[in-house]
Amino acid sequence: MRRQFLRFALAGAVGFVVDVGILYIALSLGLGYYLGRVVSFLVAAFTTWQINRRYTFPIRDGEHWTAEWLRYLLAMLGGGAANYACYAALIYALPKALFLPALAVAAGAIPGLMVNFLAARFWVFKERRDAGA
């Protein structure tokens, strides 16, 4: 389980880079702090799902990818809600600066990590975990 958690955290680190990158692109396109964050979260969630399904929980069970993606997205919404709430509070409360969106995304990642890992391990990829044991 420690190895899976480490891989999950590494996928999350990649997701963070994607999240912040897409957020800054969204901001440059005029989507704003809040809508831009929704877009960046969805792209980051898709990215981490791809990494996690290949490297963190790699057993293939034949399930169609769309069902797995929807289950993953639903599972990540729990941690994503905590992430977004923290992000939005910091965006609202702190003076606007170039680094603020990245800082707010980073702070928001902390509350969601364990919730998301447990949801992925015990629900989204449960069959893969059981098959690999």
Image (tube, grey):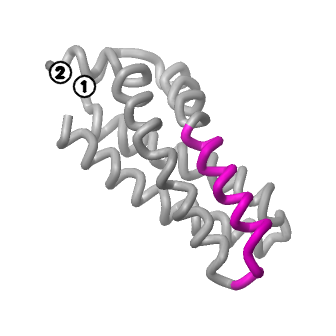
| Quarter that holds the C terminus | top left
Location of mark 2 (residue): 132
* Residue found farthest to the front: 93
Crowdedness of circle 1 by 10 Å Cα count: few (<14), some, many (20+)?
Answer: some
Rendered image quadrant of residue 119? top left
Q: In this view, does 118 lie above or below 89?
A: above
Q: Is residue 117 above or below residue 95?
A: above
Q: Are marks 1 and 2 in contact (CB under 8 Å)?
A: yes
Rendered image quadrant of residue 10? bottom left
Q: Is residue 6 above or below residue 61?
A: below
Q: On residue 59, which mark appears?
A: 1
Horizontally, is 5 left or right of 12 in the view? left
Magenta span covers which residues?
79-97
* Residue 123 picture location, percent across and down: 42, 20
Horizontally, is 82 left or right of 110 in the view? right
Q: What residue type is labelled 1?
A: Ile
Crowdedness of circle 2 by 10 Å Cα count: few (<14), some, many (20+)?
Answer: few
